[in-house]
Image (cartoon, rainbow, N blue to C red):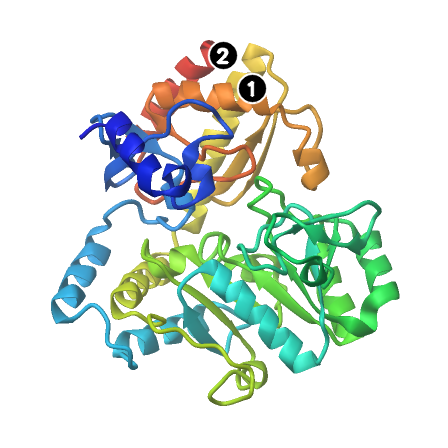
């Protein structure tokens, strides 16, 4: 069955033919592809077309598709059982690895998605502090939890308005939205609402407005101001966890949050999420404490073994310097090609993740990210796809490198990208 046939069938039974909106390619135009196989750094669609993959399932596949040790462990676990609903040894092992690798985490609770992780961490922050308000940053995405799926109103710091139908204004008003990398806006919101702020949640390196790194000292500033006002600092490391270093962005920038949200790489390609932090905070989670959270499939043994094998590889081999060099090579080469073509652009990169913005402005927050030429990005995406290069079908996302991107793959990818840019 080919792409077109599968898409038509999907439209009959799935909203928009997809289970996550961005997969419908509405932001880039053209027909979405249906992927049927992945090996290493390459994927194949239902028409048999091959692509060099810089999407990496939106980040989880840091070791590439179908990594042999992960596949072997999953196959062996499937033979033993898919789910038990009680504790299994693999969740204990994965928890031990998380505690070993992530600097601020002493105890961890597994859930089934990044959204569950952020939702649960915020509930815990509210339960511990007895406060209601949450501060988030414009352009940072923390899943589709009601309190977080909001956009900023007018002004530097304001109560949020619902970002989608279905979220009551009463819930949206519990979230305060400020511009990323803006210390003055954060100070202002704490001056006005500090006694009622339960937590600040932030992507330490933004990945959902495209890659936007924190300005020098910004994360340390967030650590200081939350401590000063008795609020908790939550790092949403669903993307950056185990991606930028074995201890994530908090290790890279040497800032310890109170709570950390994890996902993506943590599950080695299978659905998983987690939140963790200091023992005194995590001891407030049921059954130790009064803050309730539960999940039938949380700690699923198949997802746990995939995560264990992935984290062991990252811990033992620490491929981060090599991954960063690969991403630097690709991003600098792409920048050179765009310059030669005379196309204004900026490329933001941190480690093995980067984003190409079609703008002549420095991209430091969501407002500057939105200056990117979306029509040109859509054309760029379609040309790359035509040449056999898969990147995220949305401007405000990150490209990802994996350990499976070998020298010859990168060389071939750059040749294909150059061909696509010549035709822009």
Q: How many marks?
A: 2
Q: Compare marks 1 and 2 and give the one earlier in the sequence.
A: 1
Residue at screen point 63% across, 80% down: 127
Please tell me how crowded label 1 is: few (under 14), some (14-19), or many (20+) other residues with Cα within 10 Å. Answer: some
Q: Helix or strand or loop: what does disc 1 sit on? A: helix
Observer-nearest of 9 and 179:
9
Image coords of residue 129 (percent x, y): 70, 79
> According to the image, label 2 marks what residue?
424
Asked if one can make out residue 405 in the rendered structure from this viewpoint, the answer is no
Q: Secondary structure at mark 2?
A: loop
Q: Quadrant of the N terminus?
A: top left
Instruction: Give the left or right position of residue 236, taking residue 246 as reference.
Output: right
Residue 59: which disc? Answer: none
**Where does residue 231 sit, x and y in percent of width and height?**
72, 73
- Reply above or below: 103 against 14: below
Q: Give the label on residue 376, or none.
A: 1
Going 39% across and 56% down the picture, which residue do you hit? 265
Q: Write down the quadrant of residue 277 in the picture.
A: bottom right
- The structure residue drawn at horizontal position 56% and vertical position 37%, both measured from the top left corner, is 396
Badges 1 and 2: C-beta atoms under 8 Å apart?
A: yes
Q: Residue 313 sits in which quadrant?
A: bottom left
Q: CA distance from mark 1 to mark 2?
A: 8 Å
* Front residue of 317 and 189: 189
């Amino acid at each position: 069955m080919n792409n077109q046939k599968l898409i038509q069938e999907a439209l009959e039974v799935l909203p928009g033919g997809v289970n996550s909106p961005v997969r419908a390619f509405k932001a880039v135009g053209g027909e979405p592809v249906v992927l049927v196989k992945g090996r290493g750094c390459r994927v194949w669609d239902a028409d048999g077309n091959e692509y060099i993959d810089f999407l990496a399932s939106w980040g989880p596949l840091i070791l590439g598709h179908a990594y042999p040790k992960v596949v072997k462990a999953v196959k062996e676990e499937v033979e033993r059982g898919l789910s038990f609903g009680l504790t299994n040894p693999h969740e204990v092992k994965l928890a031990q690895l998380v505690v070993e690798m992530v600097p601020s985490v002493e105890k961890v609770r597994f859930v089934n998605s990044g959204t569950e992780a952020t939702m649960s961490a915020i509930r815990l922050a509210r339960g511990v502090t007895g406060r209601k308000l949450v501060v988030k940053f414009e352009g940072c995405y923390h899943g589709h939890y009601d309190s977080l799926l909001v956009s900023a109103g007018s002004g530097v710091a304001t109560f949020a308005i619902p970002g989608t139908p279905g979220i009551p204004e009463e819930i949206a008003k519990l979230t305060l939205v400020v511009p990323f990398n803006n210390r003055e806006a954060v100070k202002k919101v704490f001056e006005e609402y500090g006694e009622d702020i339960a937590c600040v949640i932030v992507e330490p390196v933004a990945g959902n407005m495209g890659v936007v790194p924190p300005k020098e000292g910004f994360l340390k500033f967030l650590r200081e101001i939350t401590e000063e006002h008795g609020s908790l600092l939550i790092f949403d490391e669903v993307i950056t966890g185990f991606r930028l270093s074995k201890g994530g962005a908090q290790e890279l920038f040497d800032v310890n949050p109170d709570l950390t949200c994890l996902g993506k790489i943590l599950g080695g390609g299978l659905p998983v999420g987690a939140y963790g932090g200091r023992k005194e905070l995590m001891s407030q989670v049921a059954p130790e404490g009064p803050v309730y959270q539960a999940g039938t499939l949380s700690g699923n043994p198949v997802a746990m073994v995939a995560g264990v094998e992935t984290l062991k590889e990252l811990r033992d081999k620490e491929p981060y310097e090599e991954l960063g060099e690969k991403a630097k090579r690709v991003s600098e080469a792409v920048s050179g090609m765009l310059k030669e073509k005379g196309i204004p652009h900026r490329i933001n990169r941190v480690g093995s993740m980067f984003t190409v913005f079609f703008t002549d402005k420095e991209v430091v927050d969501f407002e500057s990210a939105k200056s990117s030429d979306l029509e040109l990005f859509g054309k760029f995406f379609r040309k790359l796809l035509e040449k056999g290069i898969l990147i995220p079908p949305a401007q405000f996302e990150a490209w990802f490198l994996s350990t499976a991107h070998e020298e010859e793959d990168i060389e071939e990818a750059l040749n294909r990208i150059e061909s696509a840019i010549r035709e822009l």
